[in-house]
Each structure stands twice: as structure tokens, then as C-alpha cells.
Image: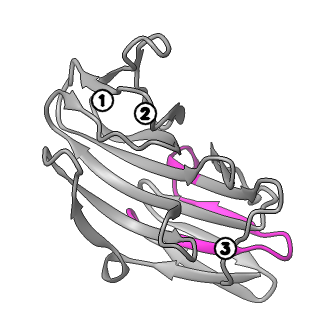
Amino acid sequence: MSLRLLTAADFRRLPWQNGRGTTLELVRHDDATGALLWRLSVADVVEPGPFSPLPGIDRVITLIDGDGFDLDFGGARPGVALRPFEPLAFSGDWQTTATAVHGPSRDFNVMTARGKLAAEIEIIGTELPPAELAYVYAGRGSVTVTAGDRTVRAETGELIECWKTEPAHVEADDPTTVLAVCLRRIDGAAMPDK
């Protein structure tokens, strides 16, 4: 297994497409044409407003800090209140709006190109779920991933990238706040080299 720690020095702050805020992009990979394959990011939500439209992108959002907000999907599905560390999947094609913002909040976002990659996000246990590529995000406190003789430790807000070839053990200060993002190819789609 190849492990790599991603910290604030690797992240970049970008404006939202709709101009109403910014996102901290943790990692992004594009295909050979420059189209998004996958992206992990963190955003602050402080007021109600629309999400940027992202046609062809599947999204999973997880509240990681704050009192949260409700999401309305323009009739595509019933609205929902985000709950801490409960991932919620939805389509970037949907007209999505943050409503009833209950206080400043921070969310963790996973975006994947529909039909090329699928993402599964879960609260991590003591073992990293099987995946060709996984990311471990430290929501609060520290988390350590050990594979063979290699160990990498991440602190709050940091990310461990895991190209998986063997089982990996995970230890965390608070396992209920550590997210595992497992990516898998769909129908032979290309995955960039590590």
C-alpha cells in the first residue's frame, strides 16, 4: 500500500461557481481532457443559498462541524436535515439549496464523475474498507493508518491518501469523526496512476 499525507500546504481555496462562498479543495483528479474525475473538499455554510449546479457529477456531503442546515432538492427528492457525520448522497444535476441554516457549519464534500467512478463514504472502524483508492479524513483529533511497516498520522482537517494493495489498520482519537472515502471504477473507467 502507498500512503501519502495531505495537509494545508497541499490544499487550495477556490470560489464557488455561484460566487456565494469558497471551498477548500483537498484533492482533485481530472481525466486526460481536463474533466473532473473526483474531488474532495471542505466548505463553510453560513447562510441559506443555492448550491452550484454540477451536471454529470455525483455528490456526497457530510456535516463535520456546526449546527448544520437543511437541504432542498427542488422536488427531485424530499428535503433533508444534515446530521453530523451522516453522509448524504445526491446528484449535482439537482437544483439544490441550503435552507434553514441553524448556525455556521462546515461540510465535507466528495464529487465523482457519474458513470466513471463511484464513491462510498463511511465512518471508519479499525480497518480500512477494501478499495483500489481510499482517503481517510480526520474530522476531529488525529487518525493513524498503518499498512505493513508504513504508518501515517493525520491531524484534524488533514487527509491520508491510500493506494491499497494490502489490509490497513486504523486508529483514531474519536473514530466517530473519521471518514473513509473509497473510490471504485465503473465499467473499466481509467484511474490515474498514483
Please name whichever residue, 39 or 187, is drawn nearer the observer in this view of the structure: 187
- Sequence-first tag of 1 and 3: 1
- Sequence-first tag of 1 and 2: 1
> Residue extending furthest bottom?
149
Badge 1: how crowded within 10 Å, few (<14), some, or many (20+)?
many
Please report contact status of discs 1 and 2: CB closer than 8 Å, yes or no.
Answer: yes
Q: What is the secondary structure assignment of the residue under circle 3? A: strand
The amino acid type, in three-letter code, at marker 1 is: Gly
The mark found on residue 93 in the picture is none
Q: Residue tagged by mark 2?
A: 84
* Range shown magenta: 156-179
Residue in view at x 35 percent, y 26 percent: 95
Q: Where is residue 111 in the image (x, y as percent from the top left)?
A: 50, 51
- Sequence-first tag of 2 and 3: 2
The span from disc 1 to disc 3 (Cα, nearest Å) is 29 Å
The mark found on residue 68 in the picture is 1
The quadrant where residue 143 appears: bottom right
The quadrant where residue 69 appears: top left
Q: Position of residue 138 (x, y in %)?
A: 48, 60
The mark found on residue 162 in the picture is 3
Res 158 visible: no
